[in-house]
Amino acid sequence: MITVIVIPARLQEPLRALTLEDDRLGVYQELVQGPIEALDLRNPPASFFVNEEAKLRGMELNERATTLAWAHNELMRGQDVIAGPAVLHGPVGPDGESTSAPAELIDLLLNARRFQVEVAPTLEGPFRLVVPEHGDWFDAYQHGLRLSGLSGPARHMRVVAAHA
């Protein structure tokens, strides 16, 4: 069994954790409403399954999945967008199977209530905290991406749960 996060394209629909008993292609195709394409994330290692025909079929832009993809893989920033529903899971296992979404992303996206952005000149850090706190993870990620898109020392960003 693995746990994935389903990210609907419509902003009004909440993200949801889903426990899958098997790792069959048909399950993912049903969740993304068509043939799947995998997109890798780097920090932390994870992947999205998305509908590879979503843009051709005129499916709605998935701003939340696009924002996460751009934040967790700098090579994707500004290069493409995700349309239609997306399924976030962990990195591919040794036998080509999907694994559970990283626990840190499950906790951040589904359980945290306050968020902070941290920026650094390199992925190794040192990361420094940016104020203000955000009440929504999507807002925090968008703020971080705006900061990392500026020239200067804050080239890398991450979103963390704010501690009371």
Image: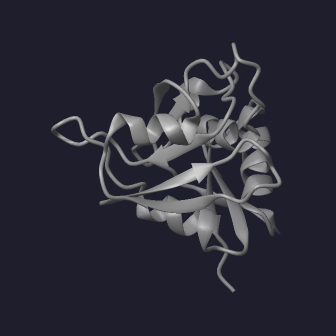
Number of numbered discs present?
0
Q: Where is the C terminus found, in terms of image quarters?
A: bottom right
The picture places residue 151, in percent across and down from the top left corner, at 75, 29
Q: Where is the N terminus found, in terms of image quarters?
A: bottom left
The picture places residue 44, in percent across and down from the top left corner, at 43, 49
> In this orientation, does residue 42 appear?
no
- Residue at the extreme left: 95
The picture places residue 15, in percent across and down from the top left corner, at 65, 58
Image: 155 above or below 76: below
> In this orientation, does residue 3 appear?
yes
- Residue at the extreme bottom: 164
The picture places residue 116, in percent across and down from the top left corner, at 71, 65
Q: Nearer the viewer, residue 72 or 9?
A: 9
User: Residue shown at 70%/23% (left/top)?
Assistant: 78
User: Residue shown at 59%/37% (left/top)?
Assistant: 69
Q: How is the image coloured?
A: one colour
User: Residue shown at 77%/31% (left/top)?
Assistant: 61
Q: Nearer the viewer, residue 90 or 18?
A: 18
User: Residue shown at 49%/60% (left/top)?
Assistant: 18
